[in-house]
Image: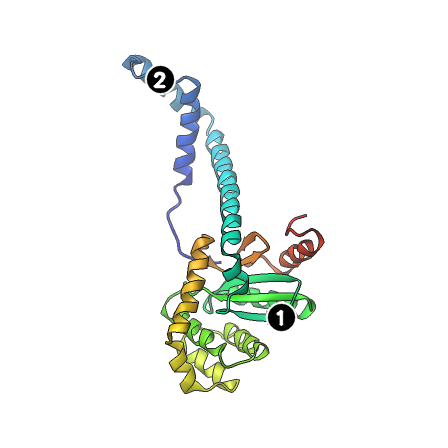
Amino acid sequence: MAFRLVPDFRPFLAAATAAAALLAAAPLRADTPQPQKAEIEKIVHDYLIANPEVIREAIDELERREKVAEADSRSRAVDKTADKLFNSAAQAVIGNPSGDVTLVEFFDYNCGYCKRALDDLAKLVDGDPKLRVVLKDFPVLGQGSTEAAEIATALRLQLKPEKFYAFHRKLLGTRGPIGKAQALAVAKELGADAARLEKDAKSDETRAALRESAELADSLNLSGTPSWVLGKEVIVGAVGFQQLKSKIDNTRKCGKSVC
C-alpha cells in the first residue's frame, strides 16, 4: 500500500499504559511521602523488567482498541458522505452502472500496490455482471500522480465508461513513472481530443472533482492507496481478489461485508 510514513509511538504509549495500570492498583495521593513514591515507582519498574511481555500485551490491546475505534469512525464517515462517496457526478463508474453492489476504490496511478490490485479489480468486474465500481483518484505520490489524475478526471467528459475503463487499465498498467505525458499518450490512443483534454484538465470542474475526492479520503481517514469502500466498511490495502469477492458476496447475502 502506498502511504505517507509517520513515527510509530505505540510501543512507548503501551509501556506508559502498562505502568499506569500498575500505578492505578496503588494510586498515589498528592501528599504521599517521597520515599513511598520512590518505592512504588521501583515496584513498577522492576515488574516491567521482570515481565516485559506486559508491554507486548498492552501494545496488542492498544492496537485492537484503535482498530475498533477507527472502524467505527470510518463507518460513521461513510454514512455522512454516502451521497458523494457512491453517487457523485464527479466520479468514474465502471462495471454495471445499475449494479446491486457498489465497490469504491481510491487509487493513485503511480501506486505499485494499485497496479497489483488492477488484475483483482478486472477479475471482479469481468466475473460479476451485477457489480458497480466507482473509481476515485487519490494522488498521494507526487506531482506526476496529480497530473495523471487531472488528465483522467478531464477524460471522463469525453469518453464513454467502457472506453474510460480501457484508459484506466492501460495507464495503471504502464511501467515506470506516470505523469501528464503518459496519461495524454494513452488518451490519444483511445481517440481523445488532446487539445480539449489539456484545457479541461485545468478547469474548475476538474479541480472541484479532485478536491471532492481528497476531502472524502480525509473524512475516511485514508492515508494511502489502494483503499476500498464496500457498504459501511473501509478496506485498506491490496487485499487480493478472494477477500474482495468474499466481502462482495457477503454484502449480497446479508447486507454486510462480514456475515
Horizontal and vertical percent position of residue 155: 48, 78
Marked residue nearer the N-terminal end (2 or 1):
2
Q: Is residue 130 above or below residue 154?
A: above
Q: How crowded is mark 1: few (under 14 residues within 10 Å), some or many (20 or more)?
A: many
Residue 245 appears at what percent x and percent y? 66, 59
Please provide percent x and percent y for residue 238: 55, 59
Element marked by disc 2: loop
Q: Which amino acid does label 2 sit on?
A: Leu
Q: How many tags in the picture?
A: 2
Q: Where is residue 109 in the image (x, y as percent from the top left)?
A: 47, 69
Residue 138: which quarter of the image? bottom left
Task: Check disc 2 and report the residue beneath it.
Answer: 28
Tell me if residue 98 comes above or below residue 257 in the rendering.
below
- For the question of whether residue 49 can be seen, the reply is no
Q: Nearer the viewer, mark 2 or mark 1?
A: 1
Q: Mark 1: which amino acid? A: Gly
Q: Mark 1 points at which residue?
A: 95
At horizontal 39% and vertical 70% (from top left) the residue drawn is 207
Along the viewing direction, whichever of 150 and 142 lies nearer the viewer: 150
Give me the residue at 55% from left, 54% from top.
235
Q: Distance between the residues labelled 2 and 1?
A: 63 Å
